[in-house]
Image (cartoon, rainbow, N blue to C red):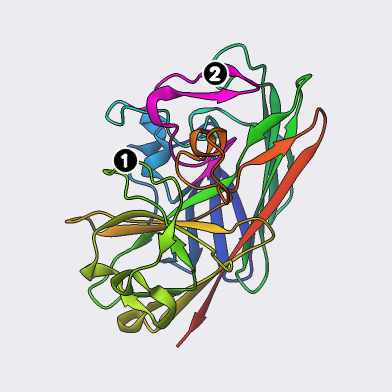
């Protein structure tokens, strides 16, 4: 991996690397030489492919906008496709944007970019992202989004981390509902989480094939690696009341993504569906959210 703008954060036994030019993405998070997330693939920097890194930001919305448009203030707002395979615009713009470096210290970096709303997402905004690595290894990721336009702006935030998938890896979190699987038409409202997807007592992620958004998320995730004697916890603050689990078949990774909004939330909200998690920012109003990751031994 070679990246001239790679920023290395260090604190005690822990380190993390951030690539501003690769979508403001995290390239790795380590204790000593042990990776705590799936590290960036060798081609990630060369291809500027944030989806091949350890984690990337979801700004100014998470997941997809079905059909590439939504209705807001009675006007059809188009959003262009941004993925070679997925037919709908996906994960916002931050992951495909080169971020500016605002401030760095030994264990902290703040990045930013601005979007004028003339192409891509049809609203002007400014985004900030801060990575902070604490002495105990806790990695705090803070996203800030500010409406820079003249009318209210619908939006959402999230993070998209990748974790290694072992045969014995278990995932635990609490949710109340589930939205439609990505291959199905969007439901007008979420349904109660079925028993086979109830993660509250822990499920082996290697036994599941999922690309699913859950609602009523309490913001806490526990990932246990018995064979590594390691546990990783995620704490998502404030408005992260949804979580997406992506566990593709035949892959050695999975994702647990704390997000503020449900999949296709813009369209669902425009039809009056409640609980989508869409935030509306007045001009110059900001939304700030933090997700923390920390590791411990079993």
Report whether 275 appears left or right of 200.
Answer: right
Look at 54% across and 44% down and name the residue there: 273
What residue appears at the point 36 percent right and 54 percent down from the top-left corner? 212
Per the image, is 64 magenta? yes
Q: Residues within 10 Å of mark 1 (few under 14, many from 20)?
A: few
Q: Which mark is residue 185?
A: 1
Return the mark for residue 142. none
Compared with residue 253, is residue 167 higher up or lower down, i.e. above or below?
below
Which of the 4 image quarters holds residue 9?
A: bottom right
Up the image or down, 21 lies above or below 136; here it is above
Q: Residue at x 53, y 56 (%)?
A: 242
Residue 97, percent from left and from top: 54, 27
Which residue lies most toward the right here?
Answer: 284
Residue at the location (31% across, 31% down)? 86
Say which mark, if any, is on residue 77.
Answer: 2
Magenta residues (range): 56-83
In three-dimensional space, the C-alpha distance between marks 1 and 2, rounded to whole angstroms, equals 20 Å
For this rendering, which residue is in front, 175 or 295?
Answer: 175
Element at label 1: loop
Task: Name the foreground residue: 187 vs 38.
Answer: 187
In this picture, residue 125 sits left or right of residue 52: right
**Secondary-structure class at tag 2:** strand
Instruction: Name the front one of labels 1 and 2.
Output: 1
Residue 37 percent across, percent down from the top left: 42, 61
- x, y percent for residue 140: 65, 59
């Amino acid at each position: 991996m070679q990246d001239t703008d790679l920023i290395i954060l260090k604190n005690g036994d822990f380190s993390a690397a951030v690539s501003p030019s690769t979508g403001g993405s995290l390239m790795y998070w380590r204790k000593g030489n042990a990776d705590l997330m799936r590290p960036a693939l060798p081609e990630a920097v060369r291809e500027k492919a944030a989806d091949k890194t350890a984690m990337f930001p979801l700004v100014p919305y998470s997941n997809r906008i079905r059909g590439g448009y939504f209705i807001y203030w009675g006007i059809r707002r188009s959003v262009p496709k941004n993925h070679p395979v997925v037919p709908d615009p996906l994960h916002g713009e931050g992951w495909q944007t080169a971020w500016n470096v605002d401030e760095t210290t030994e264990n902290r970096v703040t990045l930013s970019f601005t979007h004028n709303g003339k192409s891509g997402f049809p609203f002007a905004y400014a985004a900030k992202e801060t990575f902070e690595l604490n002495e105990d290894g806790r990695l705090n990721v803070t996203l800030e989004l500010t409406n820079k336009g003249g009318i209210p702006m619908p939006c959402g935030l999230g993070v998209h981390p990748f974790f290694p998938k072992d045969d014995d890896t278990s995932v635990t979190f609490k949710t109340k509902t589930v939205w439609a699987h990505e291959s199905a038409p969007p439901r007008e409202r979420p349904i109660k989480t079925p028993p086979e997807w109830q993660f509250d007592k822990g499920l082996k992620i290697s036994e599941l094939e999922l690309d699913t958004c859950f609602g009523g998320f309490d913001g806490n995730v526990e990932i246990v690696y018995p064979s590594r004697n390691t546990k990783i916890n995620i704490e998502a603050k404030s408005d992260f009341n949804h979580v997406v689990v992506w566990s593709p078949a035949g892959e050695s990774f999975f994702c647990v993504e704390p997000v503020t909004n449900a999949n296709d939330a813009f369209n669902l909200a425009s039809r009056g569906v409640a609980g989508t998690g869409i935030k509306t920012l007045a001009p110059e109003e900001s939304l700030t959210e933090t997700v923390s990751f920390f590791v411990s031994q079993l």
